Amino acid sequence: MLPDSLSDDEYPSLRRYMIRFSKEAKLNAVEQAHGLFLFTGEEKDGLALHDDFYAHAATLATLPDRHVIRRAESKLLGLELRRLVVRSQFHLFYRIEDGDDGPMVVVVYIRSGYQKPLSKDEARRILENQ
């Protein structure tokens, strides 16, 4: 909580950001969690991974600009994207925007770090599912 003498306008990095997952990111979270379940055979592993995606995204409610802009992904999608690493394997890509309802972090997509870089077809699909 900011003291009365300080405002969000003076210190924009102290603002609280709403978190939203795009359709693509929601689908990615389910797919990655399901893949882990199939690999381990343990339902709890998949559920825990799915929860981790949302828990890590929640940490972006403050200071989401602390992660650097990812130039290659930003250029490919035409969006200014940043990356948060989850469990040292999964990459959660997000953008920061000032929406009508206030500042917001939008999780654009989630990928395993073991996957090849995005193709143009994947980028087009991601943009369609925002």
Image: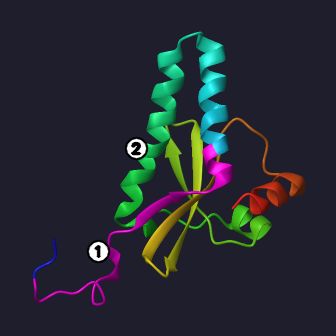
Give the residue furthest to the left. Answer: 4
Give residue 121's position: percent from left, percent from top: 89, 54
Who's the residue at 79% across and 65% down the image? 76
Q: Considering only order in the chain, which callout, 1 or 2, is on the residue closer to the N terminus?
A: 1
User: Which element type, helix, strand or loop, lies under badge 1?
Assistant: helix
In the displayed structure image, the side of residue 24 where residue 122 appears, left or right: right
Who's the residue at 45% across and 51% down the image? 57
Three-letter amino acid code of the residue under disc 2: Ala
Residue 112 appears in view: no
Q: Which residue is mark 2?
A: 55
In the displayed structure image, the side of residue 85 where residue 13 appears, left or right: left
Three-letter amino acid code of the residue under disc 1: Leu
Residue nearer the viewer, 73 or 37: 37
Q: Does the segment drawn in magenta span residue 22?
A: yes
Residue bounds of the magenta highlight:
4-26
Q: Nearer the viewer, mark 2 or mark 1?
A: 2
User: Disc 2, disc 1: CB below 8 Å?
Assistant: no
- Is the residue 26 above or below the residue 64 in the image? above
Image quarter where the C terminus lies is: bottom right
Q: Does the segment drawn in magenta span residue 78?
A: no
Give residue 68's position: percent from left, percent from top: 53, 65
Give residue 74's position: percent from left, percent from top: 70, 67
Q: Which residue is mark 1?
A: 14
